[in-house]
Image (cartoon, rainbow, N blue to C red):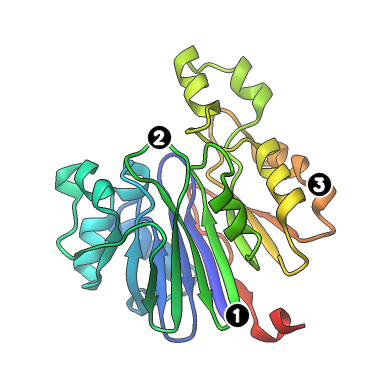
Amino acid sequence: MVEICALASGSNGNCYYIGNQKDAILVDAGISRRQILERMNRVRLDPFKVRAIFISHEHRDHFRGVRVLSKHLNIPVYMTAPTYENSWTPDRPSQYRRFVPGDIVDVGEMKVHTFSKQHDAADPCSFRIEQGGINVGVMTDIGKPCDNVIRHFSECHAVFLESNYDEDMLWSGPYPWHLKNRVASEHGHLSNHQAFELLENHRTDSLEVVYLSHLSAENNRPDIALEAFKDLSAACSVRLTNRYAPSEIYQIKNEMVAR
């Protein structure tokens, strides 16, 4: 069995939990140590099961709390060398471990598949976590679904998938023109429509649940995001994450995957 939970998801901070009965990892730590521990306690997740933190890129909404949390839990932090070198120095953890995109990192019984993606960062990566035939993807901050994203997405039983903006809200909204172009570029973020197309065209029958993640506070709304995916609601469970609170814990059981 694998348990997953979005502890935070949005431009103010991101942190995703994936674990089994003995071990767990976090992907990103973009809110404070205190907030991460409080939210884990709220949904009764044991922080001392966490064996490692994986960082997708150096932007502070993914990196902010990693140094203090890593020290508190006495666990390593995995990231690429360019991510480390381009991060804000005071946030850098002492227990830094380097990976190269494409590496598979073993954490207990879990295998963390690392892969490159398109985003406006030094060396952005996403992750597919595999354990006992169960695959969970953490795929946010993606400008365009490249071949790496598509390949790993198609193996997932559960995925935290970016659905950052509604195109009408973005182009008619308050952002300055250069920021609108950045968000919508091939190195920006996925729109509701782009995320829907990825799901529609590349999901398999084994995909159980999709958590719409990293929703923009200015350029999206939860109801609009869910509406964009309504035609696929019979194929898999489509759920929301929250920037201010943890999601419910979702359990993926091996016997369900084996069917």
Q: Is residue 124 above or below residue 96?
A: above
Look at the image and tell me whether residue 241 can be seen.
no
Residue depicted at x 53% and y 34%: 217
Q: CA distance from mark 3 to mark 1?
A: 28 Å
Q: Is residue 196 above or below residue 185?
A: below
Q: Report the quarter where the C terminus lies.
A: bottom right
Q: Which residue is mark 3?
A: 230
Residue depicted at x 58% and y 60%: 152
Look at the image and tell me whether residue 148 can be seen.
yes
Disc 3 secondary structure class = helix
Residue 173 appears left or right of 41: right
The one of 42 and 25 positioned closer to us in this rendering: 25
Residue 232 appears left or right of 223: right
Residue 26 appears left or right of 177: left
Disc 1 secondary structure class = loop
**Which circle, 3 or 2, is nearer the viewer?**
2
Disc 2 secondary structure class = loop
| Label located before the other in sequence (3 or 2) | 2
| Label located before the other in sequence (1 or 2) | 2
Residue 216 appears left or right of 179: right
Q: Which mark is residue 120?
A: 2
| Label located before the other in sequence (3 or 1) | 1
Please state the horizontal and vertical placement of residue 118, each as a whole percent of the image. Answer: 47, 40
Q: Which residue is mark 1?
A: 133
Please state the horizontal and vertical placement of residue 58, each as a whole percent of the image. Answer: 31, 45
Residue 168, quarter of picture: top right
Looking at the image, the residue that sits furthest to the top is 177
Amino acid under disc 2: Asp
- Asked if the residues shown at circle 3 and circle 1 are in contact, with their CB atoms under 8 angstroms apart, the answer is no
**Which circle, 3 or 1, is nearer the viewer?**
1
